Amino acid sequence: MKKFFTVIGGMGTLATESYIHLLNQRTEAKKDQDYLDYIIVNHATVPDRTEHILDNSKPSFLPPLLEDIEQQSKLDPAFMVIICNTAHYYYKELQAATNIPLIHMPHMAVSVMKNKYPNARVGLIATKGTIADHIYEDEIKEAGFEYSLGDKAIQDEVESLIYDDIKEKGTVDADKYHYILKTMHDKFNCDVIVLGCTELSYAQEKAPNHDYNVIDAQSIIVDKSIEYSRKIRNGEKIDFDKIY
């Protein structure tokens, strides 16, 4: 197979499934051959990203992801995406291991937000690991936004939605998800809320019936995957250094 891209996923599997579902749903196709060419790596046994970030004595997720990157690079995809926001903690190390462009999902999401909501006050909801490693916070600061991370109470609700509901039970508590958005909007005066975890993107797919503005990084990377894949199939060159 030529002119394809690679999806590094499994962190978690339902979030990766959501990405693939949206990818296929949004691809304009009238026959089999109109769909995109891609390889999915559903590496579900990658150690927990947040556990490692909060406690470096816990197993690192870098070695298995490096292995995935190195394996896939041998197949020469046009580009790669990692379907896990927290895994971008090691983005520099992963990109340094290959000459294949690795799309930076948090950076892409904030770039889109800057164009769409240039004067917004931003709320960020994510895992404790993503909050602790400042992946999104640094991007949001650099883009010039005022922002809020909420408080411990709302962080506990976010963690419960991600781990207790989605990862453990495979379900989305729509009321809990909508309560989180409402709290970020009403209590912390956020005009737009960044979904800084792919499980939250899964929640958005399953429970989109709310009135709050969200920046869904996974949804954005779906659209960009389609855009880049189409260009590559048509023989167009993409300057990945300037895509943001």
Image (cartoon, rainbow, N blue to C red):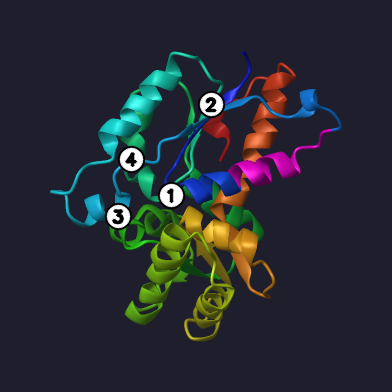
Q: Is residue 238 left or right of residue 103?
A: right
Which is more foreground, mark 3 or mark 2? 3
Q: Give the farthest residue toward the bottom.
A: 187
Q: Is residue 184 left or right of residue 155?
A: right
**CA separation in Å, label 4 and label 1:** 14 Å
* In the rendered image, the vertical position of residue 100 relative to residue 181, given as above or below: above
Give x and y (percent) for residue 194. 52, 62
**CA separation in Å, label 1 and label 2:** 17 Å
Residue 217 sits inside the magenta stretch: no
Q: Which mark is residue 50?
A: 3
How many numbered callouts? 4
Q: Secondary structure at mark 4?
A: loop
Residue at x 39% of width, y 59% of height:
137
Q: Label 2 neighbourhood size at 10 Å, few (<14), some (14-19), many (20+)?
A: many
Give x and y (percent) for residue 88. 38, 44
Q: Label 3 neighbourhood size at 10 Å, few (<14), some (14-19), many (20+)?
A: many
Marks 3,4: beta carbons within 8 A: no
- Label 2 sits on residue: 79
Mark closest to the chain's N terminus, 4 or 2: 4
- Label 4 sits on residue: 46
* In the rendered image, the vertical position of residue 25 relative to residue 243, given as above or below: below
